[in-house]
Image (spheres, coloured by chain):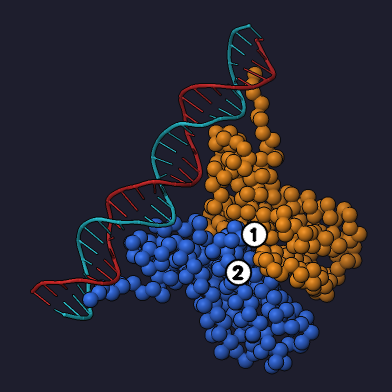
Chain colours: A orange, B blue, C cyan, D red
Amino acid sequence: MANKVKFERENVVRVASQLFWQKGFHATSTRDLQEAVNMRPGSIYSAFGSKEGLYSESLKDYTVQMKNQIEGFLSSADTVLGGLRAFVENVVIKTKDCSPSAICMLVKANSEFAEKDSNLYELSLELAAQFEAYLTQLFTQAINKGELGDTLTAVEYARFFQVQFTGLRGYFNRPGVEQLAQPMINQMFMLIKKL
Amino acid sequence: MANKVKFERENVVRVASQLFWQKGFHATSTRDLQEAVNMRPGSIYSAFGSKEGLYSESLKDYTVQMKNQIEGFLSSADTVLGGLRAFVENVVIKTKDCSPSAICMLVKANSEFAEKDSNLYELSLELAAQFEAYLTQLFTQAINKGELGDTLTAVEYARFFQVQFTGLRGYFNRPGVEQLAQPMINQMFMLIKKL
DNA sequence: TTTTAACTTGAACAGTCGCTCAAAATCAAA
DNA sequence: TTTGATTTTGAGCGACTGTTCAAGTTAAAA
């Protein structure tokens, strides 16, 4: 005794995620979203509760997608560092045209939500902490496999990676510097190994 | 035969700058600004033309202030690198409470304005390019003074500095990681010297 | 086929947005 | 003191915001 939902929740979230990533939360209107996901306000609000609810689900999905992407590169690489390098190269170099922004959506979120007690700010912190924990796992593997020395702990490598990665993505969020990407990524991984 | 303006343009821009830096352009309403600078809409609009005009002037002022700050640290330091280090330490560590955000306002601007042909996006690019040119000057001095080798060119040092600095500021835009700041800054300047 | 709970629709609400402009206030020059 | 150009004021405009909900549509269960 029911009617079935006519939209695929995964697709809707993915489309919303792209729009939010591109324009940011505040500059994306609910009418922008309605058009992008082809749903009327009532359906959106019954499915996600609010604009904030949809953003929340979009940001969570973004981090899942990012981890999936890393897993993909890891599974077709000989080493953990090789997988991470392929991931960084893909994000910084190859997706310049098809990605809504060079800057990580998590970083954008952390930058946009200023009030320290807002739900979305706290969500961005939580997801960033999860991602750091995930990276720490990967660097633990890299150390155990002998790819890296143990002058730094895994979490220290993870922090260093994040600083470099965020810094690079910010730097390449502009036109005309494409040819600098590969040498700077080479430098980044050279530094990781020499730390 | 006239009336004189009753506000000090510099102060108004500085206050507006803090608010924009904290909340971002889209999340700052003209009524927020009116209250913060204690001016009525008519006065603001006759002085700055639009919300965008006031933001534009605020962002320009921000970069001037940042350069002034660097000049201050340079003039009371023995070396260029020492001055830059004092600046970085001051920004990342000491201003955690009194600064609207750990993240550079220029980086926030570059991240917020997605449309590549918008005035404010192009302004953020222009100011970032100016800042890179300024840093390049400083690293040219550092090389000439023998503080750094010349395996990298001045502009390459400047790019490396920006990536590190932006990455660090992004990483420290969260609570509970304060004690990591000094070691990571030490690491940053160790790397610059060893490049 | 009828019933009925679930889903979709889109007009519309109350509030906020960036911004305008006629009127009032101000003060240097005449 | 009068004049008149300039600045300040704040009510209010039209557009847009996030969100609601009564009415319409759908399809599984009876």
Q: Residue A107 carries which label?
A: 1
Residue A149 drawn above or below residue B72: above
> Is there any visible trace of residue A123 in the rendered image?
no
Instruction: Name the amino acid, label 2.
Output: Leu
Q: In this view, does A67 lie to the left or right of A74?
A: left
Q: How far apart are marks 2 and 1 (CA)?
A: 19 Å
Q: Quadrant of the N terminus of chain A?
A: top right
Badge 2 element: helix
On the image, the x and y values in percent for residue A166 come to: 69, 64
Q: Which quarter of the figure has residue C29?
A: bottom left
- Residue closest to the eye, A134 or B44: B44
Residue C14 drawn above or below residue B25: above
Question: Which residue in the protein does label 2 denote?
Answer: B125
Count all numbered tags in the image, as a single digit. 2
On the image, the x and y values in percent for residue B10 come to: 41, 75
- Residue closest to the eye, A83 or B139: B139
Neighbour class for label 2 at 10 Å: few (<14), some, many (≥20)? some
Q: Which residue is drawn at 74% across and 83% down?
A: B153
Residue B40 drawn above or below residue C3: below
Q: Which residue is drawn at 68% across and 45% down?
A: A14
Q: Which residue is drawn at 63% across and 49% down?
A: A19
Q: Which of marks 2 and 1 is in front?
A: 2
On the image, the x and y values in percent for residue A99 come to: 70, 55
Residue B19 drawn above or below residue A51: below
On the image, the x and y values in percent for residue C20 come to: 35, 56
Q: Mark 2 lies on which chain?
A: B
Q: Quadrant of the C terminus of chain A?
A: bottom right
Badge 1 element: helix
Instruction: Name the amino acid, label 1.
Output: Val
